[in-house]
């Protein structure tokens, strides 16, 4: 029987509990006509996985493999011609179901069902194998290692929608401010922006992360822990375009108050998360400046395909902070500790299968 990693139930209240990891067995895969069995070669963590362990995520479930990011090889399929053509291919997994191509949001009445650790979707990528409909597979860009490929799906998709679909400013020469650099989504927005010819500026509470972002193509950055950081950031903008066209934010908090001082009239704040606070005041100064705040989460199947193709064409490489190999619970807990402490710069990855055959960074 194939193995996987799930959370184990212990007593505790949401936000106070921290569910331990446990190794489980999952049923032998039996693909239907249009399904594929993927032998996974790497998977990656997201903040939602930490929230699941803390029972702070909707639908937390036990006995369901964790993680939504994955890459692997199709080792068997159902009998349909559409299924058979995927045999032997190295593939990326669309991290959720229920959203085909609507620009507004998921078409399915129950919403978007992300893989990993909840009752809404029985599949997860921290496993030896996973079974999926072939319609949710994309051929993996050849230039990516397994670790880089596993780092792409969920954060790459979230960043794609927040930047390309929602910011309205994914255009050459536009000034883009990306908050919280070091996280997977923020880094992907940086990489997309640089590839598009934007002038990308970043913030972090860690100067080392800002320096790394500049090496990746950021024009500059500020430490948001410093008093008056927004004045310093604005002063660094070019004289011929002394304002930001858009902010892509995953923090929330006072971003509207600060952003109104930085954005052009009619500028956009594209928000994909609120790690600082679950509330974000919208001020009259923003109204008078015609500032728009646009919520953004995950993305459609079409956006996933467009994102993978862009990564392929531009030879973009997702940033991997650290990886471990195999399903050793001690090592996996170490990755979760990195996330708890915001120590990572990029994605935290688990490589799987035969270590000698796993592609290296």
Image (cartoon, helix red, strand yellow):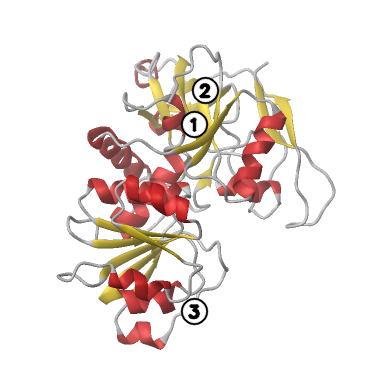
Q: Earlier in the sequence, mark 1 or mark 2?
A: 2
As drawn, the label of residue 70 is 1
Q: Quadrant of the C terminus?
A: top left
Percent of width and height locating residue 29? 58, 19
Label 3 residue SS? loop
Q: From the viewer's perspective, is 41 left or right of 260?
A: right
Tell me if label 1 and label 2 are in contact, CB under 8 Å. yes
Q: Nearer the viewer, residue 135 or 357?
A: 357
- Neighbour class for label 2 at 10 Å: few (<14), some, many (≥20)? many
Q: From the viewer's perspective, is 225 left or right of 249?
A: right
Label 2 residue SS? strand
Percent of width and height locating residue 47? 57, 49
Residue 277 placement: quadrant: bottom right
Residue at image x 56%, y 18%?
30
Label 1 residue SS? strand
Residue on which disc 3 sits: 281
Q: Earlier in the sequence, mark 3 or mark 1?
A: 1
Residue on which disc 2 sits: 40
Q: Nearer the viewer, residue 202 or 53?
A: 202
Q: Quadrant of the N terminus?
A: top right
- Neighbour class for label 3 at 10 Å: few (<14), some, many (≥20)? few
Residue at image x 31%, y 26%?
143
Q: Nearer the viewer, residue 359 or 44?
A: 359
Separation (CA) of disc 3 from disc 1? 36 Å
């Amino acid at each position: 029987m194939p193995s996987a990693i799930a959370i184990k139930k212990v007593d505790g209240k949401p936000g106070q509990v921290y569910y331990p990891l446990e190794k489980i067995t999952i049923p032998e895969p039996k693909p239907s006509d249009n399904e594929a069995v993927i032998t996974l070669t790497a998977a990656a963590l997201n903040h939602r996985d930490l929230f699941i362990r803390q029972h702070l995520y909707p639908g937390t479930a036990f006995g369901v493999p964790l993680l939504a990011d994955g890459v692997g090889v199709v080792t068997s399929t159902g009998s349909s011609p559409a299924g058979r053509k995927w045999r032997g291919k190295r593939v990326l997994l669309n991290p959720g179901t229920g959203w085909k191509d609507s620009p507004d949001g998921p078409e399915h009445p129950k919403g978007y069902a992300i893989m990993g650790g909840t009752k809404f979707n029985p599949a997860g990528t921290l496993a030896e194998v996973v079974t999926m409909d072939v319609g949710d597979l994309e051929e993996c860009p050849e230039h990516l290692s397994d670790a880089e490929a596993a780092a792409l799906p969920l954060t790459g998709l979230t960043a794609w929608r927040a930047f390309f679909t929602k910011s309205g400013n994914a255009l050459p020469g536009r000034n883009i401010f990306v908050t919280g650099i070091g996280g997977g989504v923020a880094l992907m927005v940086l990489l997309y922006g640089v590839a598009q010819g934007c002038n990308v500026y970043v913030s972090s509470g860690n100067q080392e992360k800002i320096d790394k972002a500049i090496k990746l193509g950021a024009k500059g950055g500020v430490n948001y822990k410093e008093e008056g950081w927004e004045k310093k950031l604005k002063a660094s903008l070019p004289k011929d375009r002394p304002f930001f066209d858009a902010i892509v934010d995953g923090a929330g908090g006072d971003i509207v108050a600060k952003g109104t001082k930085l954005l052009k009239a009619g500028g956009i704040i594209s928000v994909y998360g609120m790690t600082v606070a679950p509330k974000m005041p919208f001020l009259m100064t923003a109204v008078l400046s015609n500032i728009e705040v646009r919520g953004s989460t995950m993305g459609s199947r079409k956006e996933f395909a467009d994102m993978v193709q862009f990564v392929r064409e531009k030879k973009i490489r997702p940033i991997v902070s650290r990886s471990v190999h195999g399903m050793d619970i001690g090592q996996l807990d170490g990755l979760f500790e990195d996330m708890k402490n915001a120590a990572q710069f990029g994605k935290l990855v688990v490589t799987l299968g035969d270590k000698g055959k796993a592609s290296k960074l």
